[in-house]
Image: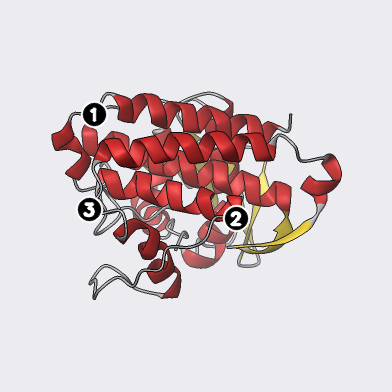
Amino acid sequence: MHTSIENLGIVWASVDRLCSGLPDSQWDLPTGCPGWTVKDQVSHLVDYEARALGLPAPQHEPGPLTHVQNALGRANEIGVDVRRGHSGAEVLREFRQVTAERLAQLRQLTEQDLAGPTVTPAGPGTVADMLTMRVMDTWTHEQDIRRAAELPGHCEGPAVDEAVGYFTRFLPYVVGKRAAAPDGSKVVFRISGRDPVVVEVTGGRGRPSADPQDAAVTMIIPVTTFAALSGGRSDVPGDVVIRGDRELGRRVLESMSFMP
């Protein structure tokens, strides 16, 4: 089975275990996605995978919502808002059913299917590219739930590695373009004990480097905080350690949000 499919199964099982232990009161806790509760996070995961299965979209129009900022947000809100009258237990049962069916569907894909073209939220790609995005997105929402419920976990393993790998590919753009790090500077990200991710700036463009020596700034970031920063969450923990040029470090951290 393809690695991303295995990793989706891992994350879905982790979400199931996490939410199975939630008392009723915690389903309505606010999360770092503005306007979304713990239950809304799970509803979003249900709705996405239900659409991927080919199930019909809900015939529902959400009312005015101040946290919806764009067309993608409004589209995501339909499957969330339609389930707001459901209990957490009901949403979790639907999550189990939909993800089980989806995993069975994905396990039927051939290598040719995975290499096939598709349109992802980041632009044209392959089915395999889309599955990597689903691993990243699902694990990120799992961490949203964990922060809200104060139940940390699932901070390492193959699914986490795939999600982090997706995030890190954008760091040269973040450092060179968005944070406008000066030419010749080097920014190092140390993410929960992993090998350092190094970005060096040349000609106004960031590029990966293998050498973490002589860095202008080094940032030590827990992996779940790295995901929250990349996702622009409102509840990012203040647990990043900046060594070196603190002004540049803060500028990079403020530039990291790239997910809609």
Residue 204 point in image, percent of width and height: 60, 67
Which quadrant would residue 75 be assigned to in this image? Answer: bottom left
Which quadrant would residue 192 be assigned to in this image? Answer: top left
Between residue 17 and residue 162, name the one nearer to us.
17
Q: Could you tell me which residue is drawn at 68 percent across and 39 percent down?
A: 106
Sequence-earlier tag: 2 or 3: 2
Is the C-beta separation of discs 2 and 3 under 8 Å? no
Q: Could you tell me which residue is drawn at 74 percent across and 29 percent down?
A: 1
Work out how far the residue at label 3 is from the one at label 1, CA to CA, in angstroms: 18 Å
Query: Where does the C terminus fall, quadrant-wise?
Result: bottom left
Between residue 49 and residue 190, name the one nearer to us.
49
Vertical order, 82 against 23 (above or below): below
Q: Could you tell me which residue is drawn at 55 percent across and 52 percent down?
A: 171
Vertical order, 197 against 234 (above or below): above
Work out how far the residue at label 2 is from the one at label 3, CA to CA, in angstroms: 23 Å
Where is mark 3, residue-wise?
Answer: 85
Where is mark 1, residue-wise?
Answer: 22
Where is mark 2, residue-wise?
Answer: 54
254 horizontally vs 206: left or right: left
Q: Could you tell me which residue is drawn at 32 percent across and 52 percent down?
A: 233
